[in-house]
Image (cartoon, grey):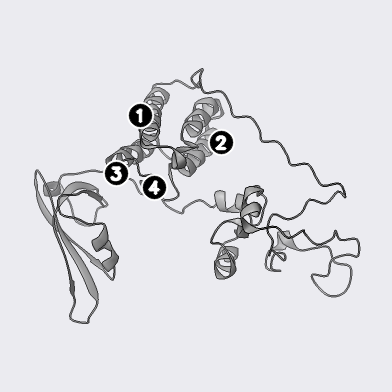
Amino acid sequence: MPIPTNVFRNILRLEEHKGFTDSAVQGGLAAFARRWAEQLTEKEREAGPVAHAISALLQDYGTADFQARGAAVARVVDMLARYEKGEREAPPDLAPARAPKRAAPVSNGFVPSAVSDFAGYEDVDPRAKAAISSGRSGIAPATAPPPPVPVSPRLARRNAGLDSPVTVLKGVQGATARLLARLGVYTVRDALLFFPFRYDDFSAMKPIAELEPEVNQTVVATIWEVEARKTRTGRPLVTAVLADDSGTISVSWFNQEYLLKSLHQGDPIVIS
């Protein structure tokens, strides 16, 4: 089921509130827009042009400057409104992206691996098993290609593709790669298509005075004061008093002292 447009719009509203820092949704706006476009197109094929045009507007969001981010968010909000009114065609200035060219193989017909220290997937991944030529599992046939030519990690990342092992990504080695393998993430493509199991809906915004218990709601408020102390058992506790035009509310975070670096008196905050 595609992510509702009102959720997308509220995420964009939150992104603007955060100053276009690409922190309104985990993974960044570009990845979120790409997932949204794919899901919408699967359900409504005729919406493909406008869906992928919106994704294209945000594909470089993570590296764009402040003004470009603001302009992209404003345009996407406008296109979402047009989509809700029934428009399904992309604007004329947003032509479909060209398909990337495939890298040509080297002269001996073997394309070197993009990762210098990648020695093959673990046997737990059935997709990565080599052909068996003897009674021992994992023994490659005699006609296997020569070992990959060693390259630097920087060059490996530059030459990586969607089907490169996930270890080509910076910081994904050893223990991290093994944890991802447990989730079925072995390639860059797997990582891109590993969707969250839930989404935060920021559309239920309410004044503090109208909050209800046991209901997921969102408040936009201002930080009045912040303090850190210890509980009776010695656990670190950060508390803050938030306020809006209707009232105040106290919030607490356990074992998260690092929040003191980002919570400051007078700053706006969005909290659910």
- Say whether residue 229 is left or right of residue 145: left
| 70, above or below 227, in the image | above
Determine contact: label 2, label 1, CB under 8 Å: no
Which residue appears farthest toward the top when viewing the image? 92
Most foreground residue, 25 or 118: 118
Query: Mark 1, residues whose alpha carbon is within 10 Å: few (<14), some, or many (≥20)?
Result: some
Distance CA(mark 4)–CA(mark 3): 11 Å
Instruction: Name the front one of labels 2 and 1.
Output: 1
- Say whether residue 14 is left or right of residue 126: left
Which amino acid type is marked by label 4? Answer: Val
Image quadrant where residue 12 sits? top left
- Label 2, on which residue? 42
Most foreground residue, 25 or 132: 25
Q: Earlier in the sequence, mark 2 or mark 3?
A: 3
- Say whether residue 16 is left or right of residue 231: right
* Residue 221 locus on image (x, y percent): 17, 47
Q: Earlier in the sequence, mark 4 or mark 1?
A: 4
Res. 1 visible in picture: no
Q: Secondary structure at mark 1?
A: helix
Instruction: Name the front one of labels 2 and 4.
Output: 4
Distance CA(mark 2)–CA(mark 3): 31 Å
Q: Earlier in the sequence, mark 2 or mark 1?
A: 2
Q: Secondary structure at mark 3?
A: loop
- Label 3, on which residue? 18
Distance CA(mark 2)–CA(mark 1): 25 Å
Res. 249 visible in picture: yes
* Residue 154 locus on image (x, y percent): 61, 54
Total residue callouts: 4
